[in-house]
Amino acid sequence: MGDFLISYDELQQTIKEVLVQFGFSDERANQSAHLFAKTDLDGVRSHGINRFPVFLKYIEKGYVNPHMEPFLESSIGVFERWDGQLGPGNLNASFAMSRALEISESFGIGCVALRQTNHWMRGGNFGWQAIESGKIGICFTNTKANMPAWGGSEPKLGNNPLIVAIPRKKGPIVLDMAMSQFAYGKLSNYARAGKNTPYKAGFDTDGNLTKDPNVIIENEMALPAGMWKGAGLSLVLDLLASILSGGDSTHEVDKSGVEKGLSQVFLALDPKKLELEEWAETKAESIIQDLKSSQVFEGKEVFYPGENVLRNRQMNLDSGIPVNQEVWNEILKFKES
């Protein structure tokens, strides 16, 4: 089945109604639905409602508890440690970033570590959350093992997404990247469409690089971005997330056979409190202008991270958000059950 267009309001309302059926309070259902719908609104289809049916199944199986909220374990000035109590990952992450932002307004920098949480869906949402507060935001998470160590023949590392968000008046810079060449949500999109990836994206059972998303997903052997460099960065992000939060590392998450009980870190820096607001804007503008002046190959264009998000957002508000009919039908079944 192909795509159809739906308004943001209808998309959010439908998701909210389903979440209420699954035990969410009205307020928490609305917030979670907003995060799901905003992801598709911004054009990040790999991490929006395409993942919603799996999210619902995790609730049914008890991996995600819609009633649980983060519990404070430690607070020392700029740093707080929270237990997510296996609550909804997107709500836990939004809360943790909001706490980091609040702390940064007092100290200039705020850091929140979160353990025993769940998949945050689109990590970029929490970078944009920082942007909307006028702050610099950095956050990262570990995952289950779905990527090999460089030279390894089995999944040992997570694709451990990293988000860095920097305010800029003419368009914020928001990097949202997994440590694998292609995020698994993106691989699933290619698989659903019956297409290969445009570049080598992972390994087959013989250790050969392949563009076949189905083989990569089945083996959980995604190619580290930057090869050995991405593998190394994945490892240190897992170390930081699990050490700072006191939570599970990738290999410990993997023991359960389910991607739950993740560890995450959220950092916020307040340019105003740190007295760098004016020159930070000038510096960011200078760097982006230099980037955009780059000579390019014929038919190519240089973009900075996050540049297309605001464009996608406005286009989808005006014309409707593209949604896969098959995924939508599956969601409606949950609504009707």
Image (cartoon, grey):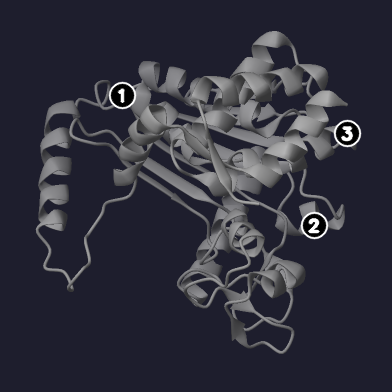
Residue 170, how many percent across, how many down? Answer: 18, 34
Residue 86, how many percent across, how many down? Answer: 78, 32
| Secondary element type, mark 1 | loop
- Gap in angstroms between the C-alphas marked 3 and 2: 20 Å
Q: Amino acid at mark 2?
A: Asp
Q: Residue visible at 45% across and 17% down?
A: 102
Name which quarter of the figure residue 278 lies in: top left
Q: Residue visible at 60% across and 81% down?
A: 210
Q: Say whether disc 3 or disc 1 marks the residue closer to the N-terminus.
A: 3
* Number of on-image labels: 3
Residue 151, how many percent across, how many down? Answer: 62, 84
- Gap in angstroms between the C-alphas marked 3 and 1: 38 Å
- In the drawing, what numbered circle is on residue 60? 3
| Secondary element type, mark 3 | helix
Give the labeled residue for mark 2.
Answer: 254
Q: Say whether disc 3 or disc 2 marks the residue closer to the N-terminus.
A: 3
Query: Can residue 86 be seen?
Result: no
- Gap in angstroms between the C-alphas marked 2 and 1: 37 Å
Q: Residues at badges 3 and 2 in contact (C-beta under 8 Å)?
A: no
